[in-house]
Amino acid sequence: MRRLLLFLILAGLASCSSGTVMDPAYGINYFDDQFECTTGPVEQEKDEKYHLRRLAYINHLKTLPEPPPRSRILLAGESTAALFSEDLLKEFLPEYNTMNRAIPGETTVVFLANLDQLVIRHRPKVIVLAIGGNDILGGRCLSTILRNTEIILDTIHRKLPGTKVLLVSIPPVVSWKVSSIAGHLNMGFQQLTNRKSFAQFVDLWPLLADEKRPVLDEKYQLYLEDKDKMDQVHFNKEGYRRFAEALRPFL
């Protein structure tokens, strides 16, 4: 029953940040002549239904067993991390003590406001942080995303000075609108971590991208339950196997 409830909540939250190949390319085209990025709240952050689903997910997290003190690895941020389920973590990273407190749909703004509750109080040794993708989906200015991410990193370091942060790239996805701008943000992420001795950049692109096009490789694409539709912004179980491979050298 608990697994079913978790699935329903995850599906509702992920729907805020996913589309299918039956739709036009999901997301916002940053290269459109009429596009203007936003420095303020994105639409999702103003959506009451999203916040109610998010609260339900947080309430579910509270029912999970409290991890051992100084649990080695904590996954945090958005759906790229949230969908790395307990079962997948045990299968692909069995040698590590891990816990997952990421929330699908999370933006840099919402995550920063809840940083103490979701991350700091657990006092992990390593934080795997996936953030920024939903900001892109909402059309937030890249400079604002990077500024918010730097504040997140610096806040973690100030409160947990012995903790290492692994900042995960925005992965290649099916939607060309997301993939076309992700590289620009990832470049900023890498430059940001280069300035922080406690942070490292984990790049998923070399492992997940199509060799000929800047999109998610076909073998990692995630099909929805009816098999006729494809999630445009998430990857499948084999993608998480590669995600684990990308993380292992840093753990």
Image: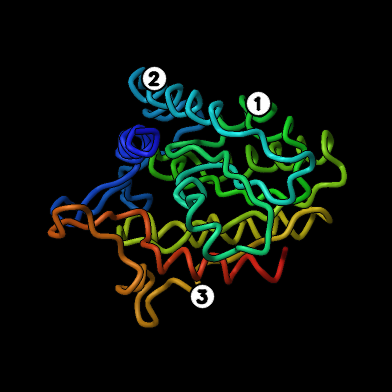
Looking at the rendered structure, the secondary structure element under dot 3 is helix
State left or right for residue 97 relative to residue 83: right
Q: Position of residue 71 (x, y in %)?
A: 74, 45
Q: Give the vertical position of 219 relative to 184 (above or below).
A: below
Q: Do the residues labelled 3 and 1 touch (CB within 8 Å)?
A: no
**Which image quadrant is residue 67 in?**
top right
Question: What is the spatial separation of the Cα atoms under label 1 and label 2, in whole angstroms?
Answer: 17 Å
Question: What is the spatial separation of the Cα atoms under label 3 and label 2, in whole angstroms?
Answer: 36 Å
**Disc 3 residue type?**
Pro
Q: Where is residue 135 in the image (x, y as percent from the top left)?
A: 46, 40
Task: Residue under label 1, please give it.
Answer: 117
3 or 2: tag closer to the N-terminus: 2
Q: How many marks?
A: 3
Task: Residue under label 3, please give it.
Answer: 206
Looking at the rendered structure, the secondary structure element under dot 2 is helix
Determine the residue positioned at 36% across, 62% down. 236
3 or 1: tag closer to the N-terminus: 1
**CA neighbours of label 1 inside 10 A, class few (<14), some (14 to 19), many (20+):** few
**Disc 1 residue type?**
Gln
Q: Which is more foreground, mark 3 or mark 2?
A: 2
Q: Give the vertical position of 206 relative to 165 (above or below).
A: below
Looking at the rendered structure, the secondary structure element under dot 1 is helix
Q: Which mark is residue 52?
A: 2
